[in-house]
Image (spheres, rainbow, N blue to C red):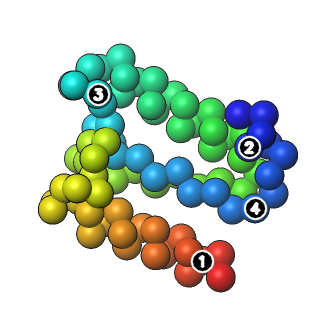
Amino acid sequence: VESLSKYDGPILFLNGEKDTRNGEQKVLLRAQIHSKQWLKAAKNGKLILIKGAGHLMTHSPKHKGEFTNAMIEFAESIG
């Protein structure tokens, strides 16, 4: 977290809303807490949660397009 506060550039935090490991609720809560801490520490951060997506959203036919679009939009927004 300390390193994030030293970096001035843009950072994208992109998580699945249901990001868990083996369906463990405590992992989901930890991921959500860490994302919020990282976002707070980042000077120029953006958090996107993909609704209904889990940890492997890039491998999910249902969510990989949303993931890719979010990455493209972020890249275009920073030039």
Q: CA distance from mark 1 to mark 2?
A: 20 Å
Q: Residues within 10 Å of mark 1 (few under 14, many from 20)?
A: few
* Helix, strand or loop status at disc 1: helix
Q: Which residue is mark 4?
A: 9
Q: Residues within 10 Å of mark 3 (few under 14, many from 20)?
A: few
Give above or below for 36 relative to 79: above
| Amino acid type shown at disc 2 | Leu
State the image coordinates of residue 23 (x, y, percent, origin top left): 21, 25
Which residue is located at x 56 percent, y 81 percent?
A: 76
Q: Which residue is mark 2?
A: 4
| Pair 1/2: label in front | 2
Q: Which residue is mark 1?
A: 77
Q: Is residue 72 left or right of residue 4?
A: left
Which residue is located at x 46 percent, y 32 percent?
A: 32
| Amino acid type shown at disc 3 | Arg
Q: Are marks 3 and 4 in contact (CB under 8 Å)?
A: no
Q: Which mark is residue 21?
A: 3
Q: Is residue 33 left or right of residue 5?
A: left
* Helix, strand or loop status at disc 3: loop
